[in-house]
Image: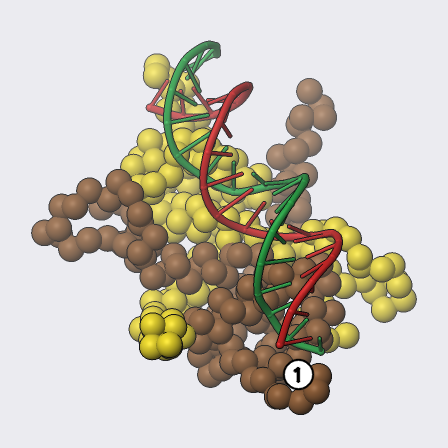
Chain colours: A brown, B yellow, C red, D green
DNA sequence: CTGCATCCCAAATGATACTG
DNA sequence: CAGTATCATTTGGGATGCAG
């Protein structure tokens, strides 16, 4: 086995079921895919600063459409990373915030963000090196 | 400012350029998006076990097509996370491996994977709680 | 063995209008 | 205010065949 079992949803050694299709059952990939879905990380980081209402989030995450905001919030809520509280006033207000589970995700997530920040110059340099030769012929 | 500046590509306080479009210039989001592109993480983890040849990677990452494997490897190479070495034999062989930069990404990445593994039961439970009421009416 | 080009379909996402 | 529904577009990604 050359691939990390944690990421491909390895079957037990005695289970010879061919992995030809539907590896989606791997829980780790499941979580990572969610974080990679373009908006989740941004929303989690925003909420890590404190609970926010729907429109506040929409304003805080500039390019997101209400459709995507709603959908992403639902996913995060479903996974137990954020809570949703409806105050039945008129007009009704809905606020969102991190759950303890969501809060526990922030340290590793921030570590990744810190890595990205820190190594951004190296990445930019690598890209310049990679892209440059094309211009030179 | 309610949103984390690191993730929305904040301009300097004196730069009032409206952020209405094209936030893609944020380097941190740029990196996170790359990690979220479904295959990059899997390839990085596989390569963290040592250099691999193209077909070995194709076999190690079960569901990937050659097209996606090539493309993802190119992206990672461009970003300086992996190297690519061509041995001009017949038939030619090409091997890939982590660069020091790529290696430096593994600790935070593994931390995130560890979080996902560790909290997977809680996430599954949260989903069951969220999905359950639908069946109950 | 590697990898690029093409075709094609499915999923993701934005825009917009409507509802409670 | 906080969504939901629909439409149109963009993008991701698989299959396949060709080339070095």
**Which one is nearer the viewer's eye here, A51 or D3?**
D3
Vertically, is B15 above or below C12? below
Q: Position of residue B17 (x, y in %)?
A: 87, 59
Q: Please name the residue that numbered disc 1 is placed on.
A: A93
Which chain letter goes with mark 1?
A
Q: Residue at x 85, y 69 (%)?
A: B13
Q: Residue at x 51, y 69 (%)?
A: A74
Q: Is residue A43 left or right of residue B38?
A: right
Q: Quadrant of the C terminus of chain B?
A: bottom left
Q: Residue at x 58, y 84 (%)?
A: A86
Q: Residues within 10 Å of mark 1 (few under 14, many from 20)?
A: few
What number of labels is visible? 1
Q: Is residue A113 visible?
A: no
Q: Quadrant of the N terminus of chain B?
A: bottom right
Q: Position of residue C7 (x, y in %)?
A: 51, 21
Q: Is residue B51 left or right of residue C13?
A: left
Q: Position of residue C20 (x, y in %)?
A: 62, 76
Q: Position of residue B101 (x, y in %)?
A: 52, 50
Q: Which quadrant of the structure image shows residue A116?
A: bottom right
Q: Is residue A17 visible?
A: yes
């Amino acid at each position: 086995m050359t691939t990390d079992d944690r990421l491909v949803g390895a079957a037990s050694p005695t289970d010879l079921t061919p992995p030809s299709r539907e590896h989606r059952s791997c829980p780790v990939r499941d979580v990572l895919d969610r974080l990679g879905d373009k908006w989740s990380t941004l929303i989690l980081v925003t909420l890590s600063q404190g609970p926010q209402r729907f429109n506040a989030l929409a304003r805080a995450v500039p390019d997101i459409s209400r459709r995507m905001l709603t959908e992403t919030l639902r996913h995060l809520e479903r996974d137990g990373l954020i809570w949703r509280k409806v105050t039945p006033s008129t007009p009704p207000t809905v606020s969102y915030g991190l759950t303890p589970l969501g809060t526990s995700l922030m340290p590793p997530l921030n570590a990744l963000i810190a890595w990205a920040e820190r190594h951004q110059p190296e990445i930019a340099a690598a890209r310049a090196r990679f892209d440059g030769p094309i211009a030179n012929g």
